[in-house]
Amino acid sequence: MRSTNNNANSELEFGQAIAIEPMVAVGTWRTKQNRDGWTIETADMSPAAHFEHTVLVTENGPEIMTLLEDGTDPWLVAPGQ
């Protein structure tokens, strides 16, 4: 897990929020960062998609903050539904 403190031994604590940001690519898993310091592309320039979930660590377990109001995952809803 990558974190701002880069401490591999750090543990999540109640009240913390983390972003889980997978990227799915057609080609290579290798990436490169653009000159703007923010944009990430696949090293072979193949098509890729990125999405994010924000998760809050609570005393009752993880709470996904980026669900729709009805509790569904917006990334699992088929187009046109």
Image: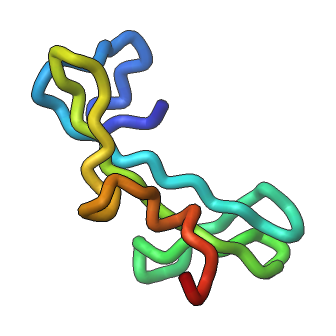
In this view, the residue in front, 32 or 73, is 73
**Quarter residue 11 falls in:** top left
Image quadrant holding the C terminus, namely bottom right
For residue 52, side relative to residue 13 (left or right): right
Give the farthest residue toward the bottom: 80
Q: Is residue 37 above or below residue 64?
A: below
In this view, the residue in front, 18 or 70, is 70
The residue at the point 37 percent across, 30 percent down is 6
For residue 79, side relative to residue 16 (left or right): right
Q: Which scheme is used to colour this image of the protein?
A: rainbow
Residue 49 on image: x %, y %:
64, 73
Residue 38 on image: x %, y %:
41, 72
Q: Is residue 31 above or below residue 4?
A: below
Q: How many marks?
A: 0
The residue at the point 49 percent across, 76 percent down is 39
In this view, the residue in front, 63 or 40, is 63
In this view, the residue in front, 53 or 63, is 63
The residue at the point 35 percent across, 36 percent down is 3
**Quarter residue 48 falls in:** bottom right
The residue at the point 54 percent across, 78 percent down is 34
For residue 14, side relative to residue 2 (left or right): left
Residue 25 on image: x %, y %:
77, 66
Q: Is residue 19 above or below residue 78?
A: above
Give the farthest residue toward the left: 15
